[in-house]
């Protein structure tokens, strides 16, 4: 299993939101590249980056910072937030981003997603961000009537090869994942899933290795590592144990 340290960027700074609320922001660093290198030095295999300004406004706002990180660190990055069109996907891949994460656009346009998957394959992931079991969009500011499990199955049928599942109510709360909702997603699809939202400590990492272990590709952690609640090196060691490797 892969541990993905998260770098959420807003106004050029590394921040974390509480339950996806843009009015509830904690700043952690003025230098996203320095933070990325810190996670590399801790042994990270991937880094998860979100352009929060892009997610909110519908277009990438921190591309130069993200491109610099992709160029200067030694591990792959995945990135989402404000990616709405094919030209942006190409721009990100050309800049060195290994996996581009789509959200709002594919909620609104399945035909677009089918085309993108056919063209870019495993370079594409979709972020399934749910609140009370329903899919959200536009930087988590709008909740649709679409049920998360229904959308997950539809994405799988379209050929998606990587799904990122976030329970918004748990995000940034350090209360542990929504295990019931995560298990429901894992039981709905066979596509590899990256879990996100609520990771608080090593116990959460260990538990992730026990639920549908062959389906959990990885887990994204943000606030827990910034607040010192989760030791990234220890989490990586556990995730790369024989039990963790079985999940990959």
Image (spheres, rainbow, N blue to C red):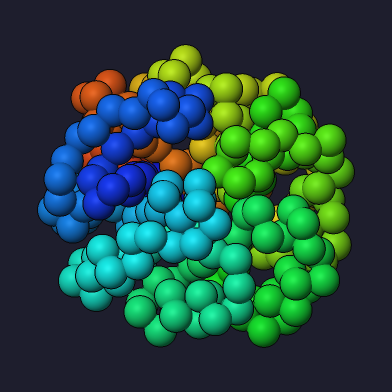
Count every numbered label the image shows and give the total.
Answer: 0
Instruction: Judge from the rendering whether residue 150 lies leftward or rightward of residue 165; answer left or right.
Output: right
Instruction: Judge from the rendering whether residue 71 lies leftward or rightward of residue 55; answer left or right.
Output: left
> Is residue 112 visible to us here?
yes
Front-most of 160 and 142?
A: 142
Please give the name of the residue rendered at 28% of the width and 48% of the height, measured from the top-left corner.
11
Question: Which residue is situated farthest in the top direction here?
Answer: 175
Q: At which x and y percent is residue 79?
A: 44, 60
Please give the name of the residue rendered at 77% of the width and 48% of the height, measured from the top-left corner.
152
Give the quarter of the image for residue 84.
Answer: bottom right
Q: Is residue 44 above or below residue 226?
A: below
Quadrant of the image containing the C terminus:
bottom right
> Is residue 214 visible to us here?
no
Instruction: Judge from the rendering whether residue 204 lies leftward or rightward of residue 105; answer left or right.
Output: left
Q: At which x and y percent is residue 59?
A: 50, 62
Q: At which x and y percent is residue 139?
A: 55, 43
Question: Which residue is situated farthest in the front direction here?
Answer: 57
Please give the name of the residue rendered at 67% of the width and 84% of the height, measured from the top-left corner.
119
Q: Is residue 74 above or below residue 224?
A: below
Please give the name of the residue rendered at 63% of the width and 40% of the height, measured from the top-left corner.
129
Q: Is residue 71 above or below residue 234?
A: below
Q: At which x and y percent is residue 22?
A: 44, 32
Give the quarter of the image for residue 120.
Answer: bottom right
């Amino acid at each position: 299993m892969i541990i993905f340290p998260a770098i959420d960027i807003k106004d050029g700074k590394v921040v974390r939101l509480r339950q996806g609320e843009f009015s509830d922001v904690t700043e952690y660093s003025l230098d996203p590249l320095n933070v990325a290198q810190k996670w590399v030095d801790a042994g990270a295999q991937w880094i998860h980056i979100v352009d929060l300004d892009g997610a909110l406004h519908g277009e990438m706002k921190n591309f130069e910072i993200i491109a610099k990180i992709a160029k200067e660190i030694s591990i792959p990055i995945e990135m989402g937030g404000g990616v709405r069109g094919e030209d942006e996907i190409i721009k990100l891949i050309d800049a060195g981003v290994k996996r581009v994460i789509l959200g709002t656009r594919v909620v609104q346009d399945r035909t677009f997603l089918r085309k993108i998957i056919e063209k870019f394959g495993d370079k594409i992931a979709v972020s399934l961000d749910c609140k009370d079991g329903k899919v959200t969009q536009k930087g988590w500011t709008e909740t649709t009537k679409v049920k998360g499990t229904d959308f997950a199955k539809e994405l799988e049928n379209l050929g998606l090869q990587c799904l990122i599942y976030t329970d918004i109510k748990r995000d940034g709360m350090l209360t542990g994942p929504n295990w019931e909702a995560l298990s429901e997603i894992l039981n709905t699809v066979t596509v590899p899933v990256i879990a996100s939202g609520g990771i608080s400590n090593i116990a959460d990492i260990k538990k992730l290795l026990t639920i549908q272990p062959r389906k959990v590709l990885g887990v994204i952690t943000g606030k827990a590592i910034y607040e010192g609640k989760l030791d990234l090196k220890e989490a990586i060691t556990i995730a790369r144990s024989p039990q963790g490797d079985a999940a990959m």
